[in-house]
Image: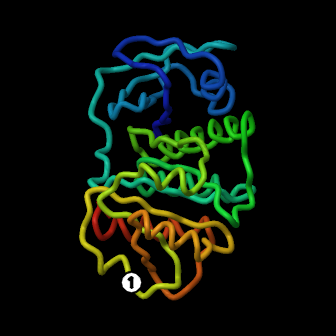
Amino acid sequence: MRVSRFHIGASLVAGEHQLEGDLAHYISRVLRLTPSAPIQVFDGSGLEWLGEVVAVGKRQVTVRLDAPQPGLPESPLYVHLGQAMSRGDRMDWAIQKAVELGVNQITPLMTERCEVKLQGERADKRQAHWQQVAISACEQCGRSVIPTVYPPVTLDMWMTDLQADLKLVLHHRTEESLASLPQPASLALLIGPEGGLSDDEITRAQTNGFKPARFGPRVLRTETAPVAALALAQHLWGDL
């Protein structure tokens, strides 16, 4: 039997819990789970709880949770992704796939050729949306620790205080491949927008300690680049 998996944004303990709001609606009206249905929940701390549905009401669902167990181990490679913002579903897709591939932190970036400009309330709403995309991706892929999606910032702001053993700016105008680089414990990846980073942005990135690297002869779309880069990085230095 398939076990439905959910994130609950509160500290959990074994025993009965009352669920309300969107999650209760999803369990009762979308999935149509009934009493005794098995479930698995996590709170983002790295622990997992197995349990079952006890009661289903119109606006409330009661679940019973067993003792917590360690969740899926995180990759030994800690990755901070700086992703230039893109329009439509492309940013959602990039975040979703990056989470599935083990990213730990994501910062949406405003660059010279970036098509999206966000400020104030609009930026707050998009950040909240992207964080929910990350949570949903964790529910699907089995991760028990939720990556942080930070508010959008300019490229220069992101680079200023960034800490990582290895910082990479990925573009096709270099001959150095990821496989030629030494193994890091932490990695920062800079992905440009459609049209790529400007020459000046690449130069500034290198001034801030980023190494240029490529992973093939073809020019990838902005939402494809982090998937390819993360898959290769996890293969070389992580858990793939």
Residue 113 vs residue 174: left or right?
right
Residue at figure coordinates x 29%, y 21% from the top left: 67
Q: What residue type is labelled 1?
A: Glu
- Crowdedness near tag 1: few (<14), some (14–19) or many (≥20) residues, C-alpha within 10 Å: some
The residue that mark 1 highlights is 176
175 shown above or below 194? below
Residue at figure coordinates x 31%, y 56% from the top left: 186
Q: Please name whichever residue, 178 or 2, is drawn nearer the observer in this view of the structure.
A: 178
Residue at figure coordinates x 26%, y 54% from the top left: 76
Residue at figure coordinates x 67%, y 35% from the top left: 124
Q: Which colour scheme is used?
A: rainbow
Residue 168 vs residue 172: left or right?
left
Does dot 1 land on a helix, a strand or a loop?
loop
32 shown above or below 126? above
Residue 215 horizontal/vertical position (percent): 44, 80
Residue 190 horizontal/vertical position (percent): 50, 63
202 shown above or below 51? below
The quadrant the C terminus occupies is: bottom left
Q: Please name whichever residue, 21 or 171, is drawn nearer the observer in this view of the structure.
A: 171
Residue 117 horizontal/vertical position (percent): 74, 51
Q: Please name whichever residue, 240 or 162, is drawn nearer the observer in this view of the structure.
A: 162
96 shown above or below 12? below
The quadrant the N terminus occupies is: top left
| Res 41 quadrant in image | top left
**How many numbered tags mark residues here?**
1
